[in-house]
Image: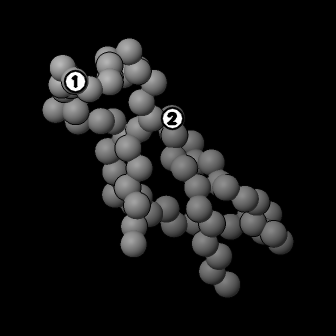
Amino acid sequence: MLKTIEGIYKNGKIELSETPPGITESKVFVTFLETKPTNWSEIIMQHQGVAEGITFESYRDELLPPIEIDF
């Protein structure tokens, strides 16, 4: 029986999002998916805004990483 569970590879270890029920030991195959950028591009980070706009610079360090939405 094949069972697929999502996980994250980080610092040499794989963290599963759930514990597979009924499996105490098993061979596994790990497939690494293409990762999306987790940082804003330099063009965005270097933007100085416009004179009439809201002050962007004071919030620059609080920006969350970009999230790509799939439709």
Name the secondary structure under disc 2. loop
15 versus 48 height, above or below: below
Q: Which residue is drawn at 72% across and 59% down?
A: 18
Q: Which x, y percent locates residue 46? A: 19, 23
Q: Which x, y percent locates residue 51? A: 18, 20
The residue furthest bottom is 1
Res 60 seen here: yes
Q: Could you classify mark 1 by the number of other residues whose Cα lies within 10 Å: few (under 14), some (14-19), or many (20 or more)?
A: few
Q: Which x, y percent locates residue 53? A: 26, 26
Q: Which x, y percent locates residue 30? A: 49, 62
Q: Which of 2 and 38 is in front in this view?
A: 38
Query: Is 37 left or right of 63, judged from the image as shown?
Result: left
What's the residue type where badge 2 is placed? Asn
Q: How far apart are marks 1 and 2 (CA)?
A: 45 Å
The residue furthest front is 52
Query: Is 4 left or right of 22, judged from the image as shown?
Result: left
Q: Which of 38 and 10 is in front in this view?
A: 38
Q: In which quarter of the image is the C terminus?
A: bottom left
Name the secondary structure under disc 1. loop
Q: Quadrant of the N terminus?
A: bottom right
Q: Which disc number belongs to residue 52?
A: 1
40 versus 59 height, above or below: below
State which tag comes first along the sequence, 1 or 2.
Answer: 2
Q: Mark 2 points at which residue?
A: 11
The residue furthest right is 22
